[in-house]
Amino acid sequence: MAKHSEVYPSPEELEAVQSIVSRVECALKTVSDQMDTPKDNKLNTEPGSVDSQERILRGVMRVGLVAKGLLLTGDKDLELVLLCSKKPTITLLNKVAEKLTAQLEVKLISQCPEDAALVVTSTKESSLTLTIHLTSPLVRTKQETTRTVNDPPDVLDRQKCLTALASLRHAKWFQAKVNKLSSAVLVIRIMRDLCNRVPTWTPLSGWPLELLVEKAIGTSERPMGAGESLRRVLESVASGILLQDGPGIRDPCEKETVDATAYLTLQQQEDITQSAQFALRLCAFGQMHKVLGMDYKPIKPRKSAGPSTQIPPAGHSSLPSKRPYTEMEKEGEGPQLNSKQRKFLKFQKHDFSMNAVMRLNQYKPGLEYRLLSQTGPVHEPVFTMAVDLNGKPYEATGPSKRAAKLNVATKVLQDLGLPTGSESKAESAGDVEGTQELVKAASTASSTSEDSSQGPILTKKGKNPVMELNEKRRSLKYELSAETGGSHEKCFVMEVEVDGQKFKGRGSNKKEAKAYAALTALEKLFPEDDMNRNSAKKKVTYTDMVIHLVNVSVHGLCTGSGSNVGYGTFYPEGGNTYASPPAASSDPSTPQAESYQSMPPPADQESPYSYGYGDEKKKMLTQSQNEGQGGDYSMYSTAYPSSVTGGQVYNNYGE
């Protein structure tokens, strides 16, 4: 856990603790040897001998944080217990202090008879304080059993000696019970840091806290990690284990039933319970860093080696930590970016399917877009969206909320100097072969048909490009050339080969890409279709035919029935005029007939010949048409379009 890495002591601190404890233990061993007077002038200090059992100083043991391995960064107070064969007295305390001073010349030793202890202070920069408690197992014997034995007048405080004996039992119990539990030591260290930071938890620090953690983790049916174990400890406190009517925490190192938290007042019990409940609510909403008193760190830190061992064994060496990425960056490369931003800059040029909002969210996740205003009429509203980045506000408008959001995201990316979605899409399209054909096909499709999102892709003739190309070239094979973009927005590139040339089209799906490829081939290989379409004449109406017939009738009456004039039929689809062999005209000076087009009306409608004429005129026109079928073609037009005749008169052909 990141918090455990912060509170765990540094190797220098652990080395300083190991140094002062080892030196004091060796010095006390020497003092014990000096204070013992051998009997019969024989030095016999073997552990199993009677003389060794009668030594004045029987041994020294580590207790407290040193014995349990619960040291945190900044802990300066260490503890040792010196066992005596008899009840410790002030005289013994002074004698031990005098001899210990001779052994530890660089240490400052002070006597505390009221606490039944000696205090050894280091003069180095670490300024560690080591307290040596004097005690004896005889202190536990009751007063009635020792009436026959007179205690020395300067005997040390009995309660202080009993507390030192209890610390010995606590250390042995901890090593036998807690060290076997997974993550228990880590959780106790974190809880100790919580007690040091939060005044509400301070009364729980020490032995009651260790019992609480052991009870919460030891009752679990399965091994748990550090995070789950910490949550279980908080849940046990929040459930009311410390309250007056709660189960409490029994001290396993006492013969009688003793509640280890009995010293807490009612107010302290309620405050600790309420604080644990509040901590659980923070954990439920993903704010565990507030409970631990640390800043939010999305990057997972490296695990520390040997989290349960504070004093490493001899010959142990730890590998140095890796240098941070920022130290490897060269100067003048711009602002430093975190891992997410570097990953974004690495892959953004390859993924051109993301829009501006997606790119900005990948660069700076968690941005909140706000709707500032909505103006304009109901049928044409204007939305204004805003977003704040690094304390700087950005605003943009659009016809919809989504468009305004895209505009403001594009504005932010441009201000940061990052490419937007449209720019990246254009750059990526340039890497694909046949970019010019794709751009041309896209521009042609946008000018002649609706966008793919609004309707189908059609040619100028209103046909499907694939169908129209299939009419001109059969058995064409379309192949998938490329597929880019993420799973949320694919981009396909289809390729087709026509007359030895390859054409590509791009779209959001294969069908759309296939249509654009066919459209590109049509524009490239068959441009004459557009020219024919542009040269096609305007649509013939019934009014034009009526005017044409009137002019033809007048022309026929003026030229006479004896003139044989060629006839023509206009085909709108073909755009060509087919004429019969021209006949000779009797009058070379006859003016050229105007160019009009005749087209038969639909069968279900009334003939346009009857428009604007009386009954006699209708009969005359009908009779003239019947006679014309027998060989008189004076009622039909002999005019050619001026673009065909070149302005020449062909009515006198053959004279």
Image (spheres, grey):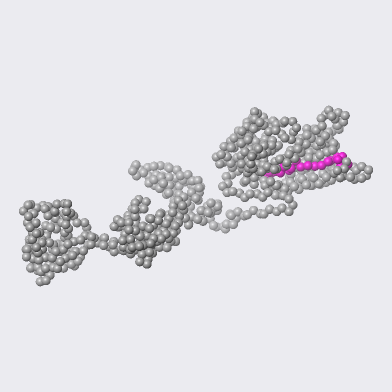
Q: Nearer the viewer, residue 59 or 25?
A: 59
- Furthest toward the bottom, the residue is 655
Q: Is residue 245 left or right of residue 552?
A: right
Position of residue 550 measured from the top left corner of the image (x, y, whole percent): 11, 57
Residue at 74% across, 46% down: 17
| Vertical comparison of 654 with 317: above or below | below
Residue 430 appears in the rendering: no
Number of numbered tags placed on the structure image? 0
Q: Nearer the viewer, residue 388 or 264?
A: 264
The quarter of the displayed image where residue 169 is located: top right
Residue 81 appears in the rendering: yes
Position of residue 220 measured from the top left corner of the image (x, y, whole percent): 64, 39
Q: Nearer the viewer, residue 404 or 279?
A: 279
Residue at 74% across, 31% down: 256
| Vertical comparison of 564 with 286: above or below | below
Q: Is residue 112 left or right of residue 653?
A: right
Q: Is residue 57 magenta?
A: yes
- Furthest toward the right, the residue is 40
Q: Is residue 491 magenta?
A: no
Position of residue 532 measured from the top left corner of the image (x, y, whole percent): 26, 62
Position of residue 634 measured from the top left corner of the image (x, y, whole percent): 9, 63
Q: Is residue 451 left or right of residue 48?
A: left
Residue at 51% across, 56% down: 346
The quarter of the displayed image where residue 622 is located: bottom left
Residue at 58% across, 41% down: 288
Quadrant where the image shows the C terminus: bottom left
- Specify start and end residues of the magenta stretch as a single range: 51-74
| Vertical comparison of 330 with 309: above or below | below
